[in-house]
Image (cartoon, rainbow, N blue to C red):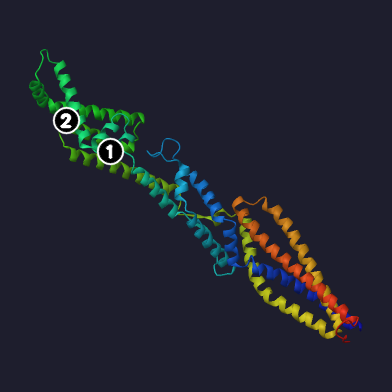
Amino acid sequence: MTLARTGAVVVLCVVFFAALLTANVVLAADRTVMDEEYAAETADEANLEAVIAEELEAELREEIDLDTGDGLPIELSTETLLEEAIDEDHVGAEVDANIDRVYAYLSGDASELHLEVDTEPVKENVLAVVEAEMASIGPGDVDDDHGAAVEEMAESEAAFLEHREAFEAEAKEAIQEETARELSDEELRQAYEDNREDIRAEAREEANERVDEMVRTGEVPERFEEPVRELAEARIDALTGAIGYEEYADRVGSAMTDLRTTVLAEFEAELDERVPDAIDLADELDEESMDHAETARSATGTASTLGVVFPVVALLAGGLLAWIGSASAAAIAIGAVSTAAGVAGLAGARVADSLFAGALTEAPSTLATFLEPFVGGALNALAWQSGLTLAVGFGVVALGLAIRYDAILPDRE
C-alpha cells in the first residue's frame, strides 16, 4: 500500500470514527430526550403529576390556612381542603401542556420558554369544597348562647311553639313577681298581652347589646354581625308572637344565606388576592438556567441537522474504506473503528451518568424526580447502542480476518 493510500485510509478511519460516534449519540438523543412522546411517557412513569400535586399543595398551604381558629366557621382542615381540591388529572394535563411548550420552544416553534401551572380549576375546587362545608353550618355554629335554640325553632314548628310557650311562661312569672297579689291565669295572660310590645322591645335591646358585646370581644367576627343580629331579632320576634313559624324559618334561612354568601365572597376575594390564576414556572428560573435552556434550544436545531449529516458521512467514509483497500483490510479497518466508537460511546455514557448523578443531588426534588429517568433513559439508550456497535465491530473484524486467511471469501487486493 502506497504512503498516499495509507494516509487516506488513516484520514478516512478518523472521519468514520468521528461520524459514527456522533451519529450514535445523536440517534440516542433523537430516540429519547428529543422525542416529546418519550418525555411524556417518562413523566407518566415517574408519576410526576403526583409529585407536582404535592408541591402545589405545599405552596397553597402557605396561602390558605384554616387551622388557626381565625378562619371559616367550618370543621375543615387545610390539608383536607387541598387534598379534595387538587385533582391529579388536572395536574397531569398541566404536565403534558408544559412538555408541549418545552418542545415547541426547543424546536423553534415558540420564541420564548413559557411554563405555567393553571391554578384556576384548583381555586374553583377549593371554593366548591368550602361552599359544600358552609352549607352544613347553622345558627349554633355562629352563636354559642342562643344559636342552638334558634336552630331548633327553625327545624320544627313543634319546637318553635315549645320555645315560645316557655318564653311566655317566664314572662308571666316575672309579671307575677312584680305584682303584690296573686294573679289568675286569665289576668296573667292579659297582663302579658298588654306588655307584649314593651317585653319585645326590651328583649330586642338586650339581644342587640349582646351581639354588640360579642363583636367587640371578637366572639363574633365583624363580617357575621348583621346575619347574627338578624338571627337574634328573629328569635325575639318569634318568641313574643310578632311572627309565625313560616316567616321565622324564612328569616333564619335568609340570615344564614347572607352569612354564607358574605363569608364565601370574602374567602374568594382573599383567595384571588393570594393565589394567582396561573403560576409562571419560567419566572422561577435563574439566569443560568435560562442560558442552559437557550443552549439546549440551539443544540436541538444542530442535532436535527447532525442526525442526517453524520450517518451519511459515516456511510461514505465506510464505503471509501471498502473501495480503496482489500476486502480484508477494509473489513478490519471498519470493524476496528466501529469497536473503538462502541467503546468510546460506552465509556462516555458511564462518565456522563456519573457526572449527572452528582449534579442531580443539587437539583430541586421535583425536577430530579423527572430528570433522573429522563436523562438516565437517554444514557442507557446510548450505552445499548454503543454495545451493539461494539459487537458489530468485533464481528466485522472477525470477518476481515477470516477473509485474510482464506477461511471464507477470497481476498481482494
Residue 384 shows which numbered tag?
none
Q: Nearer the viewer, mark 1 or mark 2?
A: 2
Which comes before the other along the chain, label 1 or label 2? Answer: 1
Left or right of 106? Residue 226 is left
Q: Quick check: 286 above or below 156?
A: below
Q: CA distance from mark 1 to mark 2?
A: 20 Å
Q: Quick check: 388 above or below 280?
A: below
User: What residue type is disc 2 on?
Assistant: Thr
Q: Crowding at label 2, few (<14), some or many (≥20) Cα neighbours within 10 Å?
A: many
- Residue 207 location in percent, x, y? 24, 29
- Residue 215 location in percent, x, y? 32, 31
Looking at the figure, which quarter contains the C terminus? bottom right
User: According to the image, label 1 marks what residue?
Assistant: 227
Looking at the figure, which quarter contains the N terminus? bottom right
Q: Crowding at label 1, few (<14), some or many (≥20) Cα neighbours within 10 Å?
A: many
Q: Quadrant of residue 30?
A: bottom right
User: According to the image, label 2 marks what residue?
Assistant: 240
Given contact means CB atoms under 8 Å apart, are the residues at marks 1 and 2 in contact? no
Left or right of 360? Residue 260 is left
Residue at the (38%, 39%) spot, across then down: 74
Q: Quadrant of residue 254?
A: top left
Residue at the (58%, 55%) spot, across then down: 285
Left or right of 288? Residue 167 is left
User: What residue type is disc 1 on?
Assistant: Pro
- Residue 391 location in percent, x, y? 79, 70
Instruction: Please indicate, yes or no, whether residue 286 appears anywhere in the rendered image.
Output: no
User: Front-most of 259 and 218?
Assistant: 259
Residue at the (68%, 71%) spot, across then down: 27
Left or right of 354? Residue 269 is left
Q: Quick check: 282 above or below 406?
A: above
- Residue 167 location in percent, x, y? 19, 26
